[in-house]
Amino acid sequence: MSEKIKIKGLFAGFILGGAIGGTIALLYAPKSGKHLRSEISWKAKELTEDWKKNADCMSKNVKENAENMLDGAKELLNAGKKKIAADTENLKTKEKNHNKFL
């Protein structure tokens, strides 16, 4: 699990680095101020939308994983309860049989 987090962090670093590098490249490009500001604004909106989409996707994945883990925990709990009930019943039966011979 931590390996996936490291990879996502590395990927996010590359994206952020690319965005910063692209912004710096735009600032030093020979364009008019108005045109440059327009491009920066457009690129910022594009990056913001991408980040929102990625955040939504990651949020859904986290929610699904949490729900799956909760379902698995409930199943284990129910299986444990059934096992305890069966073991208790077996002990009661053995105790009754043992008391018959006394």
Image: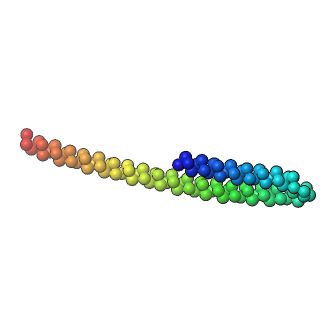
User: Is residue 60 left or right of 43 when viewed as pictured?
Assistant: left
Q: Residue at x 42, y 50 (%)?
A: 73
Instruction: Work out which residue is located at the far top of the displayed protein and give it.
Output: 102
Tell which of 60 and 96 is nearer to you.
Answer: 60
Tell which of 64 and 37 is nearer to you.
Answer: 37
Instruction: Work out which residue is located at the far right of the displayed protein and give it.
Output: 32
Q: Residue at x 79, y 54 (%)?
A: 22
Q: Residue at x 26, y 50 (%)?
A: 86
| Res. 15 in view | yes
**Colouring chosen for the image of the structure:** rainbow
Tell which of 80 and 7 is nearer to you.
Answer: 7
Quarter location, residue 57: bottom right
Q: Dividing the image into 4 quarters, which one contains the C terminus?
A: top left
Instruction: Work out which residue is located at the far left of the displayed protein and give it.
Output: 101
* Percent coordinates x, y for residue 1 in the rendering: 53, 49
* Percent coordinates x, y for residue 63 in the rendering: 54, 54
| Res. 34 in view | no
Q: How many marks?
A: 0
Tell which of 28 and 75 is nearer to you.
Answer: 28
User: Is residue 46 left or right of 86 when viewed as pictured?
Assistant: right
Q: Residue at x 77, y 50 (%)?
A: 20
* Percent coordinates x, y for residue 94 in the rendering: 16, 45
* Percent coordinates x, y for residue 33 in the rendering: 91, 55
User: Is residue 5 left or right of 73 when viewed as pictured?
Assistant: right
